[in-house]
Each structure stands twice: as structure tokens, then as C-alpha cells.
Image (spheres, rainbow, N blue to C red):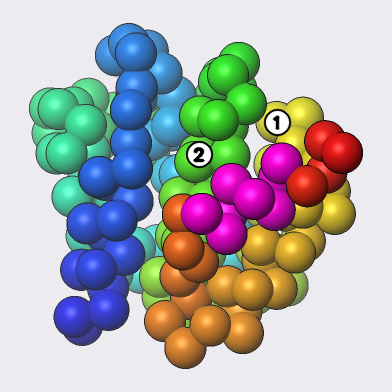
Amino acid sequence: MQLFFEKVSFAANIQIMNSQEEKIGLLSEMIAFAVIDGVLHDREYDFLLMVSEELGIDKDTFLQLFSKRNEFKVVKDEFHRILHFYRLALLMHCDGILHERERIFINEIGINMGLNPQATKRILKLMEDSPNQMVEAETLITAFQEQHN
């Protein structure tokens, strides 16, 4: 359980959003991702609720997002898209079960966000191999910067 709260804390603390719309967009995408396997686990719900609280999104808005889970907006700034992708990858590992549909969906999200597919695959592999499914921030950013060279 400690690992779960470390993931929540890291995901919330690396978060720098410019507008309420971006925050809601992030949370909407996280909700869509959480239910991709057809089940919203208690730990996933708790994670989403804590992220919404960290983002300053009231509970009514949070609950309304579950009915709008197919609507999301991609953040334009690459740095924020990388962080957004990483938060979603953390969510993917949150329930302790990695479904093939989740793996496919996170890759599609990365592509739709305009992120380099090789970098996203590398980060996902590093997360999978990590004992706590986390990647250092420097490693995360470096993986995407290497693709620019």
C-alpha cells in the first residue's frame, strides 16, 4: 500500500497544469484509461480521487467525468504530454494487473499525444522492469530527448 501512495504523491507533485480545462482533461483521460479493462478497481478509484483532489477538482466534477470518459484533450506542450503519459502509465500499474488492453491503449495514447513510440515503449519497459514500477524523472525526460537527436 505504501508503494501506491508513493505513486500518487509522485504523480501529483510532478503535475504543473496551466488551466482547469487541462486538469479536467488529464483526469478524464485517466478515468478512461482506468476502466479500459472493464473494471474500476477500488485502488484505481482511490488513486483517481486523490489525483482529482491534488488538482483542485471538486468531487461533483470528478464524478461527472465518469460519464464523459471518452472525451479528452491532448496537452500541447511536449513536457506536459510526457508527464501526462507517465501518470497514465503509473495508473496502468496501480491495480497490480497489467492487461493487454491496457498495454495497447497506453501505446495508442502515446501516439495520439504525438510522443515518439520508441521512447514510450522504452519507458513502459523500464517501468515494467522496475520493482516499484517507477522511473526517475531524469530517465523519463532523457528517454524522450534522446529521440530528438
Image-based side of 49 in relation to 104, left or right:
left
- In the picture shown, does residue 108 fall above or below 128? above
User: Pointers 2 and 1 in contact (CB under 8 A)?
Assistant: yes
Give the residue at x 51% y 29%: 80
Q: Which mark is residue 92?
A: none
Residue 2 seen in the current view: yes
Quadrant of the rendering where the C terminus is positioned: top right
Q: Quadrant of residue 139?
A: bottom right
Does 59 appear in magenta? no
According to the image, label 1 marks what residue? 113
Q: Position of residue 70 (x, y in %)?
A: 57, 31
Q: Where is residue 100, by image quadrant?
A: bottom right
- Which quarter of the rendering shows the N terminus? bottom left
In magenta, the rendered stretch is 138-145
Residue denoted by label 2: 84
Position in image of residue 56 (x %, y %)? 14, 27
Q: Is residue 67 left or right of residue 36?
A: left
Relative height, residue 14 to residue 136 (above, below): above
Main secondary structure type of the part rendered in magenta: helix
Q: Which residue is at the front of the view, 143 or 85? A: 143
Q: Which residue is the extreme one toward the bottom?
A: 131
Dividing the picture into quarters, in which one does residue 3 lie?
Answer: bottom left
Circle nearer the N terminus (2, 1): 2
Residue 53 x, y percent position in the rendering? 14, 39
The crowding category of the residue bearing disc 2, from other C-alpha atoms within 10 Å (few below 14, some 14 to 19, many at least 20), is many
Q: In 3D space, how far apart are the residues under numbered discs 2 and 1 (Cα atoms)?
A: 9 Å
